[in-house]
Image: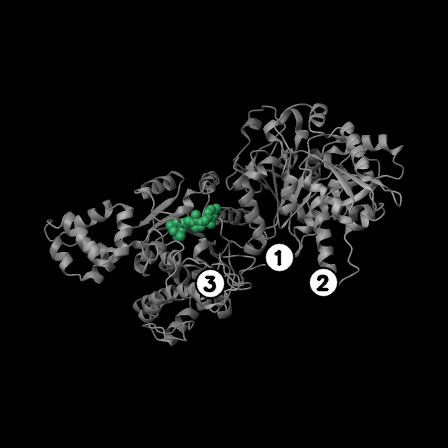
Amino acid sequence: MDADRHLACLRALERKLLWLSSWTIHHANHLRERRDGLKVGGHQASCASVVTLMTALYFDVLRPQDRVAVKPHASPVFHTIQYLLGRQTRDALQHFRAMGGAQSYPSRTKDGDDVDFSTGSVGLGVAMTLFAALVQDYLRTKKLVPTDGAPGRMVALVGDAELDEGNVFEALLEGWKHDVRNVWWVIDYNRQSLDRVMEDRLSLQIDTLFRDMGWDVTVLKYGRRLEAAFARRGGDALRQWIDECPNSLYSALVYKGGAGWREHLLRDIGDVSGLRELLDEYDDPALHALMTNLGGHDLETVLDAFHGVRGDRPTCFLAYTIKGYGLPFAGHKDNHAGLMTPDQMELFRKSQGVETGREWEALEGLPVAEDELREFLAAVPFAQPAERRHSPPVLRVPDPFPVPKGSKLSTQEGFGRLLADLARGGSALSERIVTASPDVTVSTNLGAWVNRRGVFDRRRQADVFRLEEVVSAQKWEASPEGQHIELGIAENNLFLLLAALGLAGPLFGVRLLPVGTLYDPFIARGLDALNYACYQDARFLLVATPSGITLAPEGGAHQSVSAPLIGIGQPGLVAYEPAFQDELAEILRFALEYLQDENGGSVYLRLSTRPLAQPDRTLGPELRRGIVEGGYWLVPPEPGADLALAYTGVVAPEVQEAFAELREDARGAGLLAVTSADRLHAGWRAAQSARASGDAAARAPVETLLAPLAREAALVTVLDGHPAALSWLGAVSGHRVVSLGVERFGQSGDIPDLYREYGLSADAIVGAVARACLDRRA
Ligand SMILES: Cc1ncc(C[n+]2csc(CCOP(=O)(O)OP(=O)(O)O)c2C)c(N)n1
Ligand SMILES: [Mg+2]
């Protein structure tokens, strides 16, 4: 196909994308039954803004190994592209934003048409491409993937308002540190966000910022027609006028059309020699078309820019666009959620040569014959057969894990030792573990692992302190063989890196087992990014210490209170909080399997720095199962017992002390170790639904555990975290509950003082038991 025909086909598809994306949204809002009276929504203006950029990328520039994060509100454009490529059904488009249909925002897990990266929470998809590029580098540097082919480019189509999100800049700086390659960020610079038109001259700030971070910047400001007009007599003044035109005025004139442009141009620069003659050559619609001929809407300009990239340097394309380009509300500041009215849609349909009743036809009404377009589509490079969703084999996990030895150990230390053990052995599993930490590698006990496995860097870098014979327990040699990725403090970056590492299997065909460590309270700092990672079904192990008020003198502001509730509430993430080393070893073993299980997920371990005396025991199969399912009786209750204590994690000694004191009076009482409130709760919910669906025999582990207790038994629950994480236990069999935990925080102190202050001491537990028993009798 010659270049002219090629361009003609692209133009035809560009036009069809605008139509079908608008129609898909229109159909969802106006033509589908609405049973709940709620608006359906969709963003016709945001879609129109990126149609040219996405046409160029998907139908010409991208290769199958490239990966894209599409700005959330361009979801209909993405699905329409897939539809034209035969990879999305008409039914899914007809059910846009309905159950089972094309999703509001591109979704790896909910859409059927091969979304590379989910988007939705603005800024996160953007940064995700950078971390995916880093992961690709990791795999290629280690030759874990074939390196004969060209690397994939990790592309983000970025709404310009996304650049207000701090996580984008956190990622940029991290990318600079790691010398990131093969990332393209294509900024849809329509100078509009949701509410408003943006600041003038922001482009200069963006330009400088990206260059400072080591990126190439290509600005696509004007299209070919405008450039040609600038070259004419009077053209310099025209260029200067547009260059200086405030964004608000430009947008307003885009909305008003040809007459508005003419009036302003004549008033401002009408006396410039040649200008009037230049304008006279254009009638109003032609003048409007000229003045809106921005780089990001000019297919040839866009293609030249993308194809002009040489090498693998990260590149930012700043593409000037118009929000709603080609639609009646183009440029209007309120167009973000704007929808074309049925009358406007009718006019638009006619202008597109689409016949009534044939609105969904993929290739009709275009100035290029359908056969030619079909031939073109069949040859689109991106759509050539290639495996884009890999499922690499499962790595064997040793069973059981050796239990860290020592009479008094903290779970954090045990975790460090378990990883160090894995580092020592040369198993296939350990080769695929990648650790990462936002500047808390040493203080979260990853030191021994890093000493053995080294820090990852494309360039080999000696440990200067070692060379200079300065004694240090930490060996920080960096090399391509390293298996630890050291990040700056930004927690968002940790979660996005975990998301990218955790998708290495499906994206790049190599299973990695990412382990990220951080301080428990700072999960909240990156919570949206964590949620984002889980939503994409990325698989990783998150290890958080120190946690709770138990970090004592070091604590105060660092105490985490709601983290156990996050553990229960976060979909895609199973939370554990072990107390003892044998529990930890079993949970870590399980986690490495669960990460790889098709129906599994990610795992969060909430650990502590408080050393605890260890029980003298060897775990049998039943205990191991209990630990993984979320709980077991440390002291089983006698049948009909009327008291049980249930605890999670590091408060074990206080609970045991209280229990010993109470046992005299409360004969037959039980002591329940809850290793995972999250799993116990999930199991309970699952059993309830199973029973609701007719499986009368369904029984949750927690139901079985609590079964021996008397109906009127009292339960006292204790954890170093929000009491609601365990108080629900009372609802399982209708037991009365007194829950101890932490609802305030912020005080430094030692453990005796703090446990007394917050009511977690053995005395406080005994007191709670007394209250629970009194309540019961009342
Ligand atoms: C984290 C987050 N905050 C707020 C929103 C709501 N929101 C959706 S789009 C948008 C503005 C988008 O503007 P821009 O990125 O410029 O996209 P455009 O529609 O102009 O292409 C906002 C605030 C969101 N999706 N995510
Ligand atoms: Mg915008």
Q: Label 3 vs label 1: CA separation?
A: 27 Å
Secondary structure of the residue carrying numbered label 3: helix
Gap in angstroms between the C-alphas marked 1 and 2? 35 Å
Three-letter amino acid code at disc 3? His
Q: Which residue is mark 2?
A: 693
In this rendering, would 645 be left or right of 439? right
Indicate which label's residue lies in the foreground, 1 or 2: 2
Query: Which label was assigned to residue 79?
Result: 3
Quadrant occupied by the N terminus: bottom left
Q: Answer with left or right where residue 560 lies relative to residue 161.
A: right
**What distance separates the C-alpha of mark 2 from that of mark 3?**
35 Å
Say whether marks 2 and 3 touch (CB < 8 Å).
no
Q: Position of residue 579 (x, y in %)?
A: 74, 37
How many discs appear?
Answer: 3
Mark 2 residue element: loop
- Tell me if mark 2 has few (under 14), some (14-19) or many (20+) residues whose alpha carbon lies within 10 angstroms of its own: few
First-in-chain label (1 vs 2): 1
| Quarter of image, res 549 | top right
